[in-house]
């Protein structure tokens, strides 16, 4: 198979049908051009041009080969244009592994902007516990992850936001009421240090454990039970968007009278942050966070 440079040589020869003019266009000497043509014809196993005093003429095989050369060069140009478009536009698939609570309550608005702004890009999304999402990224099955809590991630880790924790209920309005109520404390299972933080806060504020406890598998179940008045729970503010005023929200504080918060991080490896679709997504994330900050300000 001829190389691209050889295909260009054949195309110029077919256009000029003259060795001298073709040599001038290709910036080579006529003997050098003649030698290269002989080598190409040897590779194809047949003469491609008939040489005469009046110039060149194509053989039947030459017509086929030069047509192939022109079509191949045209295709090469189309591919180059497509590659150039890749550099200007965002293509490819963005693979994200996201902690469930972020995927349910924060990501949709960000992802909506991404797909509207970059319609040529595709999105592959998985949600679950933060530990599983970190594993997906570490095993290179996903480009980036958005996880909760302080992780021991060894790659790139970008802090996105902190959201404070609240005790929420439809009846309890102040912490002092908790020791007097028989309403159940609704808790959800977590793979992070969330449960440990709640335990520390509880023992710092109350002498006895809750009178009644309900443990559920997912934060969304915990949230819905609380919102429907089944009992009280401790939830991050990310899960409390668009709640009605009838739901009391009591902020949690640490020993230094600072709000207890949960951190959200975007993680990945350096190589994936070079991908155009990842860079575009990160730009939208920062843009969205800045707008949220200005809105709160």
Image (cartoon, rainbow, N blue to C red):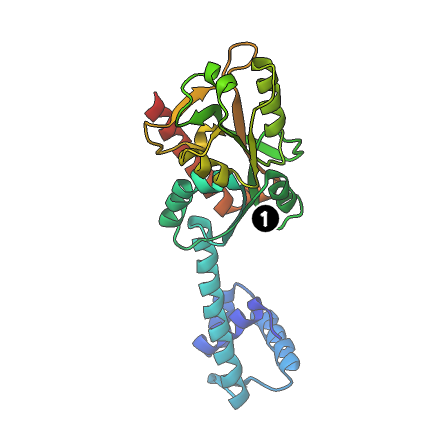
Circle 1 sits on which residue? 142
Quadrant position of the C terminus in the picture: top left
User: Which residue is painted at 44% across and 26% down in the image?
Assistant: 168
Q: Position of residue 113 (x, y in %)?
A: 37, 44
Q: Is residue 154 left or right of residue 216?
A: right
Residue 202 percent location from the top left of the image: 58, 19
Residue closest to the far top? 256
Whether residue 247 sits left or right of residue 148 in the image: it is: left
Seen at 44% across and 53% down, the residue is: 121
**Label total for image:** 1
In the image, residue 163 lies at what x, y percent?
A: 47, 26
Instruction: Give the camera-side residue of 78 and 24.
Output: 78
Residue at the spot x=60%, y=22% of the render?
209
Is residue 7 at all visible to an observer of this figure? yes
With respect to residue 21, does 215 lie above or below?
above
Label 1 neighbour load within 10 Å: few <14, some 14-19, many 20+: many
Above or below 23: residue 174: above
- Relative horizontal placement of residue 292, taking residue 177 as reference (left or right): left
Q: Is residue 286 visible?
A: no
Q: Residue furthest bottom?
A: 60
Look at the picture and state if 2 lies above or below 156.
Answer: below
Secondary-structure class at tag 1: loop
Of the pair 137 and 244, the residue shown nearer to us:
244
Relative image position of residue 162 (x, y in whole percent): 49, 26
Quadrant location, the N terminus: bottom right
Judging depth in this view, the residue of 24 and 102 nearest the camera is 102
Res. 3 image quadrant: bottom right
Task: Classify residue 200 by image quadrant.
Answer: top right
Relative depth, front residue between 67 and 131: 131
Residue drawn at point x = 45 percent, y = 42 percent = 104
């Amino acid at each position: 198979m001829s190389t691209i440079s050889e295909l260009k040589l054949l195309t110029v020869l077919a256009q000029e049908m003259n060795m001298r003019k073709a040599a001038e266009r290709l910036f080579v000497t006529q003997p050098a051009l003649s030698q290269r043509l002989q080598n190409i014809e040897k590779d194809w196993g047949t003469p491609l041009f008939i040489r005469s005093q009046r110039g060149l003429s194509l053989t039947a095989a030459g017509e086929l080969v030069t047509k192939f050369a022109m079509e191949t060069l045209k295709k090469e140009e189309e591919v180059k244009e497509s590659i150039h478009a890749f550099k200007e536009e965002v293509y490819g698939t963005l693979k994200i592994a996201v902690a469930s609570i972020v995927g349910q309550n924060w990501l949709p608005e960000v992802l909506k902007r991404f797909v509207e702004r970059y319609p040529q890009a595709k999105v592959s999304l998985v949600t679950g516990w933060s530990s599983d999402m970190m594993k997906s990224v570490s095993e290179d099955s996903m480009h980036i992850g958005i996880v909760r809590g302080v992780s021991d991630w060894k790659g790139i880790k970008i802090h996105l936001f902190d959201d404070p924790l609240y005790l929420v209920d439809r009846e309890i309005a102040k912490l002092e009421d908790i020791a007097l109520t028989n309403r159940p404390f609704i808790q959800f299972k977590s793979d992070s240090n969330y449960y440990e933080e709640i335990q520390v806060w509880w023992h710092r504020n109350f002498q006895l454990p809750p009178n009644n406890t309900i443990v559920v598998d997912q934060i969304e179940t915990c949230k819905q039970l609380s919102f429907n008045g089944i009992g009280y729970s401790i939830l991050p503010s990310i899960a409390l968007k668009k709640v009605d005023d009838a739901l009391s929200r009591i902020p949690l504080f640490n020993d230094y009278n600072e709000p207890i918060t949960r951190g959200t991080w975007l993680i990945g490896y350096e190589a994936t942050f070079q991908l155009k679709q990842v860079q575009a997504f990160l730009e939208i994330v920062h843009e969205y966070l800045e707008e949220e900050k200005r809105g709160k300000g």
